[in-house]
Image: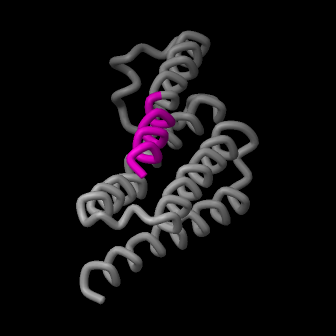
């Protein structure tokens, strides 16, 4: 299960690299300085291909942080059974799909669907952890 944590962290690292690989060229193309980027609303003027990558990077710092905590707790509680491991890797796979959708064609309904299913999977890990701890 810790491999799933590292895989998701690697996705975050990849998106960090992609963030700069898209944002800097967009800023150069639009002649926007780093100082100007700090002003409210300026980021919204960047092309969607640069904004979507930045948004995805930020999204990977939201719900996945719950995943990291839950998996580490499950490992500490020795609840690394086959189902929890499968759920953990399924969650990672869904977050990869979410990132691919958001950083390419960004269909919001598809992205929301994948996001929702990923939360159901994460919810399964949380419930299984609670049952294992208190059940």
Percent across and percent down for residue 117 are 61, 68
Direction from residue 7 to residue 135 in the image, left or right: left
User: Whole-percent x and y of residue 66?
Assistant: 35, 59
86 horizontally vs 3: left or right: right
Q: Residue at position x 69%, y 46% from top? A: 101
| Most foreground residue, 25 or 119 | 119
Who's the residue at 51% across and 42% down the image?
55
Q: Quadrant of residue 112?
A: bottom right
Closest to the observer, 103 or 95:
95
Please report the residue visible at 43 percent of the width from the left and 70 percent of the height from the top. 125
> Would residue 2 appear left or right of 103 to someone viewing this image?
left
Specify whether residue 2 is painted magenta. Answer: yes
How far from the left and from the top, in percent, is residue 10? 46, 33
Q: Which residues are magenta?
A: 1-13
Numbered circles on residues, count: 0
Which residue is pictured at 67% across the width and 65% down the height?
Answer: 113
Please say whether residue 72 is one of the residues in the magenta stretch: no
Majority SS type along the magenta span: helix
Picture quadrant where residue 111 is located: bottom right
Note whether 34 is above or below 103 in the view shown.
Answer: above
Relative vertical location of residue 38 with respect to residue 71 in this rendering, above or below: above
Identity of the residue furthest to the bottom in this view: 135
């Amino acid at each position: 299960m810790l491999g799933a944590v590292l895989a998701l962290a690697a996705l975050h690292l990849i998106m960090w690299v992609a963030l700069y690989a898209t944002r800097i060229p967009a800023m150069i193309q639009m002649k926007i300085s780093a100082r100007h980027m700090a002003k409210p609303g300026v980021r919204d003027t960047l092309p969607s291909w640069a904004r979507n990558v930045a948004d995805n990077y930020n999204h990977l710092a939201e719900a996945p942080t719950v995943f990291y905590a839950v998996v580490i707790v499950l490992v500490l509680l020795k609840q690394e059974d086959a189902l929890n491991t499968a759920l953990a890797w399924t969650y990672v796979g869904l977050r990869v799909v979410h990132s691919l959708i958001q950083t390419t064609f960004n269909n919001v309904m598809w992205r929301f669907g994948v996001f929702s299913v990923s939360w159901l999977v994460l919810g399964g890990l949380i419930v299984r952890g609670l049952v294992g701890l208190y059940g």
